[in-house]
Amino acid sequence: MTHEQSAKTITPTEKRFAQEYAFDFNGQDAYMRATGNTNKKSASVQASKFLKKDRVKEYLEEYVKEILGPQEKTLLGNVAFWVKIRDDTKARNSDRLKASENLAKYAQMFVGKKEVDIHAKVQILDDI
């Protein structure tokens, strides 16, 4: 089933949520971006409900596969693992932090350091 076929049974809000969720795999933030809801507790509850719906899960899976192409199995496996570790309250904090970092890198949330070497001639003019 393509994500267009899944889209026939999914609501526009669920579809937008799934697309936002695919960006960083953070349900609360995805729900807030998709709906404009700024209440974190409410967004967290609603995101959890959306993620339990089969039609949302199916659409999300197809949407991510379409975006990722042939590397999706490895990448999706890694992302699912990182999300599981990040959300596991029994995991060591260092493991949860590393999983969060990996998810942030995946979502390209970090800006890489770039060194720029500029050679220019400076000319000072004094009009006094």
Image: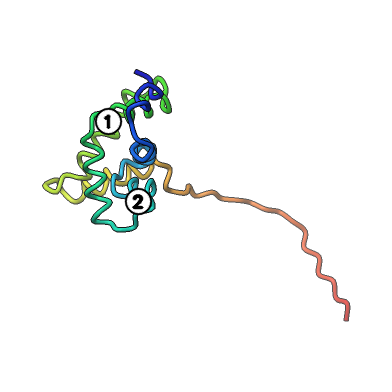
User: Residue shown at 37%/26% (left/top)?
Assistant: 8
Tell which of 34 and 103 is nearer to you. Answer: 34
* Real-space Cα separation, disc 1 to disc 2, in angstroms: 18 Å
- The residue identified by callout 1 is 57
| x then y, percent, for residue 47 | 26, 44
Position of 117 relative to 70 (above/below): below
Residue 81 vs 48, above or below: the answer is above
* Amino acid on which the number 2 mark rests in the picture: Met
The kind of residue tagged 1 is Lys
Query: Going by the picture, which residue comes out furthest to the bottom?
Result: 128
* x, y percent for residue 20: 38, 41
- Which image quarter holds the N terminus? top left
Tell which residue pokes out farthest to the right in this image: 127
> Is the residue marked by circle 1 packed among few (<14), some (14-19), or many (20+) residues within 10 Å?
some
Residue 61 in percent (x, y) is at 32, 27
Q: Which residue is mark 2?
A: 32
As drawn, is 113 to the left or to the right of 73? right
